[in-house]
Amino acid sequence: MPSPVSADPVASSAVDAALVAANRIEQLEQALARAQSLYEQAPCGCLSIDPDLRILNINQTLKTWLGLPDLDWPEKPHVLHFVQPQWLDAVQSRLRELRTSGHCEPLHLGIQRADGTPMQAVLSATPVCDAGGRFLHANAMLRQDTGPPTASASHPSARAEFLQSVTDRMASRLAYYDKNLICQFANKAQAERYRMTPTQMVGTPLSDVIRPEALAKILPRVAAALSGNAQTFEVARKQKNGQREVFLLSYLPDAQPTGIEGVFMEAQNITERKRTEEFVLEANRDLEDRVRERSEDLFQSEQRYRLMIDAIQDYCIYFVDAKGRVTDWTESAKRLHGHRRTAMLGKPYQSLLINGTNGEDEVDAAQVMRLAQAHGQWETRGWRLRDDGSRFWAHTVLTALRNETGELQGLSSITRDMSAAKSLEDVMNDLNRELEERVAERTQQLVAANKDIDVFSHMVSHDLRAPLRHIASFVSLLLEHMSETGDKLALQYLNSIAKSSKRMGQMVEGLLEYARLGRVAIDVQPVPLAPLLEGMIAHLRQSNPERDIEWVIAKDLPVASGDAMLLAQVWDNLLGNSVKYTRRAEKARIEIGWQLNAADERTFYVRDNGVGFDLATAGNLFVMFQRQHHSMDFEGTGTGLAITHRIIERHRGRIWAETDLGKGCTFFFTLPFNSSEPAPKIPRPAMAELAG
């Protein structure tokens, strides 16, 4: 699977640097492991001894010889602990010589193993000093000695062979030049650098192996070392293949009692390490640049944020911790509340609240804190106290601020001065109370008026109908009586009285119906119009058998929503008017249709080619007892359209007319449309009965 690629160049550079560093560390660890293995498995015992003759390090070979493979002391052991008693003075003497003169001859001595058995060995040691020549510790080597000391065993040539064997295994280039700069020792790596063997290197002047231009640069360093000043420096060289290599050179003076006898030279190839260091350094510079840029962006963003917070006028923002103590008091908070920043930091925000508000505050402060932390955000309203003692009505939003792991970091408080709105709200509440009182008063008046209307309706229904019935009855009797006398003028008068009393009775009935419509409850239900209109048209045809009327009815009449009885009365009034006012037309035509308007209402219409009327003078078209034609031309009481208008109003609809004298008339009315309800299955006989 490919490694994910970061979208951030800074993060990418850091990852690359980390990978290179990790690879280099792994290589160094491998080299260290090889060196450690060489040290632990060397054919001789190796150990380091500090100035107090305590063992600093010991390899596995010597541990095995001593019979202590798992040696683990809580503190540094003393080297004399492993020396047989008769050799203690000799060992101490040689180590003192090593510290003072810098060298000592090998010593044959007896070693005490862990099990008490003795072992003969040869001890050789070399000092390790700092740049100032101060003794640090001694590196000692112990070889088993199976026999008594011999001249060959302690001969310098034997020591040289052993030293050569050890140093040839090292990756560093090692050499020793005397004060005349003649090579006295070189390990394998140093000799191979100049295509020679270590034996060939011995006796070779330094000037024979170093190029003149390079020799001119290093001779001052060599001279300084021969003067007793250790030199450590880096040298970069370009190889024949064009690659650049970097070496760490160390020149250590060979200080003897007689003076500086030579110089130890060591060259370590640190090219890979330098490349890693340079890469990491460059990556760090790039990272620092990007971090600096990002920091500047964040600083500018914070400045803009701070300026924005401090500049707002109607609001203020401040921050509190989980316990409600103020942690950041902004300039906008100071401007709104009046308190200084130093006075508010660390104070509980509850100190801004006002006690004794007669329950006007929605909740207390502690409850607001709990609710904001539990729900993430909470709003509250209440009175707040300014520094000068004044107060203002505030709308506050507390928001819990959490980090990526969900831990609560604090809360932000955004407060707005709503005093003006509070005052307006109080005024509105006063107005609403006054309005409610007026509505209650007006309702009582309407109730009283409705009672008066009920009394009037009862009076009309009983007190006026009785005299009308008497008049009609006596007129009928007079007509029967006068028909025998044959007085035509008297008969004409009596017929007029009969018609007028009948018309007045119809007007009373219309008035009662109109008054009843204002109080009757509307039973809203789905009303299928197609069967309703079919029954009405059939009834009109039976009532006017001599008329030849063309009926045009839309085939997609919908299901209306309303009171079935009242809607039937609307259609009966409108269709009856169309039949009546098309009486003089040669070919009467009545059209019924509908459409859905932009206000989601169903608009129904009844169009005819009757006599029409002048709409400009028909301002009282839907007023009770107001007619557009004389009763001698067209019968009627002027109540039908008024009742129709009242029914449509009760259904929250509208009704209007489009007409012109002699050009027919079209009545429109609307009914609200909520949803397409399925038509109930009402039997056609029932619809016909409803239409009749």
Image (cartoon, rainbow, N blue to C red):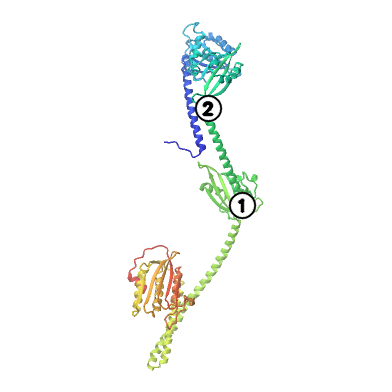
Question: Which residue, given by chain and number where applicable, does mark 2 sit on?
Answer: 274
In this view of the protein, which residue sits in the foreground, 61 or 553? 553
Residue 561 picture quarter = bottom left
Q: Quadrant of the N terminus?
A: top left
Q: Which amino acid type corresponds to the residue marked 1 in the rendered image? A: Gln
Distance of label 1 from label 2 (alpha carbons): 59 Å
Between residues 186 and 554, which one lies in front from this camera angle?
Answer: 186
Q: Residue at x 37, y 75 (%)?
A: 589
Quarter of the figure that contains the C terminus: bottom left
Apparent side of residue 412 relative to residue 665 in the rendered image (left or right): right
- Secondary element under disc 2, as helix, strand or loop, is helix
Q: Where residue 470 sits: x, y (%)?
A: 43, 85
Query: Residue 88's quadrant in the figure?
Result: top right
Task: Identify the residue under disc 1.
Answer: 313
Q: Nearer the viewer, residue 570 or 232?
A: 232
Q: Amino acid at mark 2?
A: Lys
Viewer-nearest of discs 1 and 2: 2
Residue 59: give x, y in percent of width and height.
49, 17
